[in-house]
Amino acid sequence: MLLAIGTINLGLLIGGNVFEQLYVMPGCRQAGGIATWKAFNTRNVALFFLPLAVSAGLCLVASTALVYSDAKLVAMASVVSALVLTGAYIIPRIVRVFARPRPGQTEAESLRLLGQYRSANRVRLVLAFSGLVCAVIALRG
């Protein structure tokens, strides 16, 4: 049951990451895109996806602790790695671009941070997808 919940949450996270990569990032990289995104998006989507990420990680950790398998271990390690990447690298860039830019931060610097965020999001997407594949293998086994 825990493995199934973690797998479903992980699938939803991958959908959110793909949405960010294909829709949010290109729109923000256009001229005035960051200001437009801030003006029309008062609710932070991460507040929806972050609890899903944490619950996916916790479910996979608990599932692996209860009944060990190599596929579960790899899935758990992938999700935990994606969470660490998110907390240590991605969230600080999101905050500096969208929530609390430094005084005098230029559009060019914001776009540079956005590019770093986009590259890290690709790595996070690969980690999450590999975790999903392993979780599905563990569900089938």
Image (spheres, grey):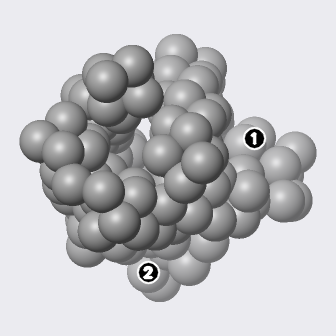
Q: Is 85 situated above or below 70?
A: below
Q: Is 14 situated above or below 1?
A: above
Residue 57, position as x, y percentages in the image: 42, 61
Quarter the C terminus occupies:
top left
Viewer-nearest residue: 80 or 118: 80
Crowding near the residue tagged with mark 2, few <14, some 14–19, many ≥20 C-alpha atoms within 10 Å = few
Viewer-nearest residue: 38 or 71: 71
Residue 107, position as x, y percentages in the image: 44, 50
Give the side of residue 116 with respect to residue 102, left or right. left
- Marks 1/2: CA distance? 18 Å
Please tell me whether mark 1 sits on a helix, a strand or a loop.
helix
Residue 113, position as x, y percentages in the image: 31, 53
What's the residue type where badge 2 is placed?
Arg
Quarter of the rendering containing residue 80 = bottom left
What's the residue type where badge 1 is placed?
Thr
Residue at the spot of label 2: 102
Residue 28, position as x, y percentages in the image: 56, 33
**What residue is shown at x 60% (from left), y 48% (from top)?**
1
Viewer-nearest residue: 102 or 135: 135
Point out which mark residue 110 bears: none
Quarter of the rendering containing residue 109 = bottom left
Crowding near the residue tagged with mark 1, few <14, some 14–19, many ≥20 C-alpha atoms within 10 Å = few
Point out which mark residue 36 bears: 1
Viewer-nearest residue: 139 or 90: 139
**What residue is shown at x 26% (from left), y 44% (from top)?**
72
Q: Is 94 situated above or below 140?
A: below
Pointer 1 or 2: first along the chain: 1
Give the side of residue 104 with respect to residue 50, left or right. left
